[in-house]
Amino acid sequence: VEDTLSDINAAYYLELINNCGIDRLFLAITNCQISEPALFLLDLASSCECIFIYQRANYANVPWNSAYLFGLVDADWVQIIYDMFARRMTNLSIDNYAYPSWITKGDGEKLMEMQKSIRR
């Protein structure tokens, strides 16, 4: 995926993924401008088995100390990720060295605990 993700190309990517049966997806994103990033991720999780998100630095628009990922600041990533795993997706990798405070250690512990309730 390109540096900037808009609603138009997000819809195109979802259509392409669904029409071509793509199971594994790598997203490298700097600037996410889609209107509902969490909903887009849930749609991806319904279509793909494995998702890798690489968040590039966007320091011109988002300070380095922001809790930022995929166009969202201070999002409830525990719930979003949990909801992603409740769909088809079985593997998720997020590389967000640019904004390390996007998730806390406590959030990680909550996710580890919540994963037990996801049935496959």
Image: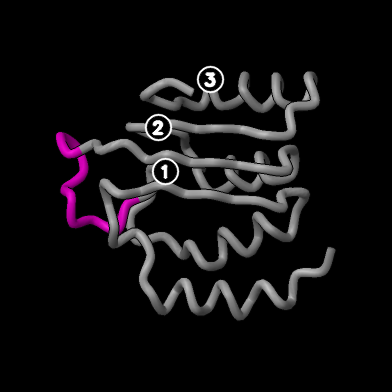
Residue at mark 1: 70
Report the mark closest to the observer, 2 or 3.
Answer: 2
Query: Disc 2 vs disc 1: Cβ atoms closer than 8 Å?
Result: yes
Residue at mark 2: 29
Question: Residue 107 colored magenta?
Answer: no
On the image, which quarter does residue 119 sit in? bottom right
For image coordinates 57% across by 59% down, the residue present is 81
Number of callouts in the render? 3
Tell me where residue 4 appears, x and y as whole percent.
Answer: 38, 25
The CA distance from mark 1 to mark 3 is 15 Å
Residue at mark 3: 9
Tell me where residue 22 appears, x and y as whole percent.
Answer: 74, 27
Q: Residues within 10 Å of mark 2 (few under 14, many from 20)?
A: many
Callout 1 secondary element: loop
**Above-or-below relation of 101 to 29:** below
Callout 2 secondary element: strand
Q: Amino acid at mark 1?
A: Phe
Q: Amino acid at mark 3?
A: Asn
If you read the primary sequence from the N terminus, does the residue marked by circle 1 or circle 3 appear first? 3
Q: Residue furthest right?
A: 120
> Magenta residues: mostly which secondary structure?
loop
User: Magenta region: which residues?
Assistant: 59-68
Q: Is residue 14 left or right of residue 7?
A: right
Q: Is residue 94 left or right of residue 117?
A: left
Q: Amino acid at mark 2?
A: Ile
Q: Image quadrant for the C terminus?
A: bottom right
Q: Residues within 10 Å of mark 1 (few under 14, many from 20)?
A: many
The CA distance from mark 2 to mark 1 is 7 Å
Q: Is residue 77 left or right of residue 103?
A: right
Question: Residue 66 colored magenta?
Answer: yes
